[in-house]
Image (tube, rainbow, N blue to C red):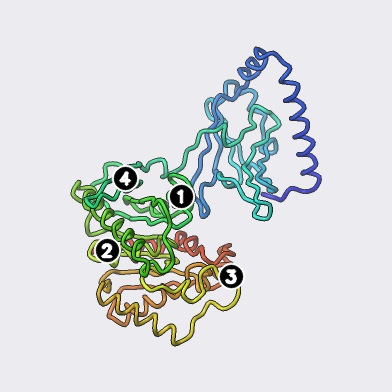
């Protein structure tokens, strides 16, 4: 059972760290030949972290040690290990041996580590064992991540000269398979994260395969985020439209290669990515068989900043009836020019999302229904539902959506 470090354990770790520092000081005085010999004497020759993508990114499911002397591993028990991450300790639940490998199965913990937002400190995990040969950190281990390792990174330059950095997952021997286009959020853009963050920060790129779908997945990683109310910011809006044109060409290339079924192209995204879904679908409505926009940003009608609802953590997240009607009319005017009533859409939002207002989803859903859309759905999570799912930050409705088999089945049941 994972637990917080107690005062005694913290003291013990402090003493242990002091002792380790003392040993390190001694080691500096030892001739380099002895140090090299000591390293060579370790029974562990390789370490592999086996991870999966969970609700909040990479999670360690098992650690595999390749060893030269199985006799030293035979007497190890789960109690010989503990894993620290910040002030939390995770237990090892099982140890398995096979051939020359020892696999420990811990309580699931974050591969990326944890942040203390009160101090600004970042903590990585440390695996501690009574046999020091089995101690390890992230830097000492190789990484294996289910599904993510099978994505291929590529670059595509469209006829409009836009260059896309994209990742593509294709099932083995794929022929005429469905395609999911995953639009990542603002936290995964390159200028504030790292290459590939669009794949591993949440389940958006892999939840489809985790739920048993044989599907291709395409995800473009964008260099920067876009602003709230982008439709009124001409330069940013034109850039978004240019990206959509480029993505359309890339998808057409995949279709022409015979890998993708043009009648089963789906799109999903969260936050800025949810807004990206609405932008792409309204620009190319005939491309998609279904869409799943989650906590979508206000790309069509500016609302979040306009009404002081962006990053509003105190007070009511509502607008007046008059403002509602004005937003409704603007949304209706836009949809009349960019008709998406024939595209099945399942809207997802937390009712009290403090970042991207839920009015973006609820008003567009109502507009489409009033204009004759017959195959749309709306899920508006209450505060209680978000809390029950362990989400105290009511923006992260994607966590609930990506664990909803019914929702994912519905998307993949749609065919043009």
Give the distance between the C-alpha atoms of the residues marked 4 and 1, in whole angstroms: 30 Å
Helix, strand or loop at mark 4 = loop
Relative side of 29 to 284, left or right: right
Residue at the disc numbered 1 = 191
Give the distance between the C-alpha atoms of the residues marked 2 and 3, in whole angstroms: 36 Å
Residue at the disc numbered 4 = 171
Q: Which residue occupies 51% across, 33% down?
A: 142
Q: Give the x, y percent position of residue 153.
A: 35, 42
Q: Which residue occupies 42% across, 54% down?
A: 224
Residue at the disc numbered 2 = 289
Q: Earlier in the sequence, mark 2 or mark 4?
A: 4
Snapshot quadrant of residue 232: bottom left
Give the distance between the C-alpha atoms of the residues marked 4 and 3, in whole angstroms: 42 Å
Helix, strand or loop at mark 3 = loop
Tag nearer the camera, 2 or 4: 2
Tag nearer the camera, 4 or 1: 1
Helix, strand or loop at mark 1 = helix
Residue at the disc numbered 3 = 313
Snapshot quadrant of residue 281: bottom left
Q: Give the x, y percent position of residue 273.
A: 40, 60
Q: Nearer the viewer, residue 9 or 408?
A: 9
Relative side of 81 to 172, left or right: right
Whether residue 402 is situated above or below residue 82 in the rendered picture = below
* Badge 1 density bin: few <14, some 14–19, many ≥20, Cα 10 Å: few
Determine contact: label 4, label 1, CB under 8 Å.
no
């Amino acid at each position: 059972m994972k637990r917080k470090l107690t005062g005694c354990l913290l003291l013990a770790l402090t003493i242990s760290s002091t002792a380790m520092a003392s040993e390190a000081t001694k080691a500096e005085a030892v001739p380099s030949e002895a140090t090299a010999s000591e390293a060579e004497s370790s029974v562990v020759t390789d370490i592999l972290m086996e991870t999966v993508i969970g609700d909040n990114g990479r999670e360690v499911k098992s650690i595999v040690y390749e060893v030269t002397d199985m006799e030293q591993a035979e007497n190890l028990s789960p109690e010989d290990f503990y894993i620290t991450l910040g002030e939390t300790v995770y237990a090892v639940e099982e140890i398995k041996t096979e051939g020359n490998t020892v696999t420990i199965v811990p309580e699931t913990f974050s591969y990326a580590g944890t942040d203390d937002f009160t101090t600004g400190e970042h903590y990585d995990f440390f695996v501690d064992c009574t046999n020091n040969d089995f101690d390890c950190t992230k830097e000492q281990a190789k990484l294996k991540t289910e599904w993510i390792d099978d994505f291929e990174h590529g670059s595509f330059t469209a006829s409009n000269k836009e260059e896309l950095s994209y990742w593509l997952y294709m099932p083995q021997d794929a022929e005429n398979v469905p395609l999911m286009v995953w639009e990542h959020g603002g936290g995964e853009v390159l200028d504030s994260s790292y290459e590939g963050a669009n794949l591993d920060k949440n389940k958006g790129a892999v939840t489809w395969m985790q739920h048993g779908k044989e599907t291709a997945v395409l995800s473009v990683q964008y260099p920067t985020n876009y602003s709230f109310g982008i439709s009124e910011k001409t330069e940013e809006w034109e850039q978004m439209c240019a990206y959509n044109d480029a993505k359309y060409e890339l998808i057409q290339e995949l279709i022409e290669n015979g890998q993708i079924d043009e009648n089963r192209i789906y799109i999903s995204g969260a936050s800025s990515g949810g807004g990206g879904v609405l932008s792409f679908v309204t620009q190319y409505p005939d491309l998609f068989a279904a869409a799943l926009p989650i906590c979508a940003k206000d790309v069509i009608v500016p609302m979040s900043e306009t009404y002081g609802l962006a990053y509003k953590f105190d007070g009511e997240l509502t607008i007046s009836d008059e403002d509602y009607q004005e937003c409704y009319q603007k949304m209706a005017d836009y949809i009349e020019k960019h008709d998406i009533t024939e595209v099945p859409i399942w809207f997802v939002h937390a009712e009290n999302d403090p970042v991207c207002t839920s009015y973006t989803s609820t008003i567009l859903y109502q507009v489409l229904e009033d204009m004759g859309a017959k195959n749309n759905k709306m899920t508006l999570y209450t505060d209680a539902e978000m809390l029950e799912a362990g989400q105290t930050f009511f923006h992260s409705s994607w966590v609930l959506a990506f664990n909803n088999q019914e929702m994912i089945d519905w998307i993949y049941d749609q065919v043009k």
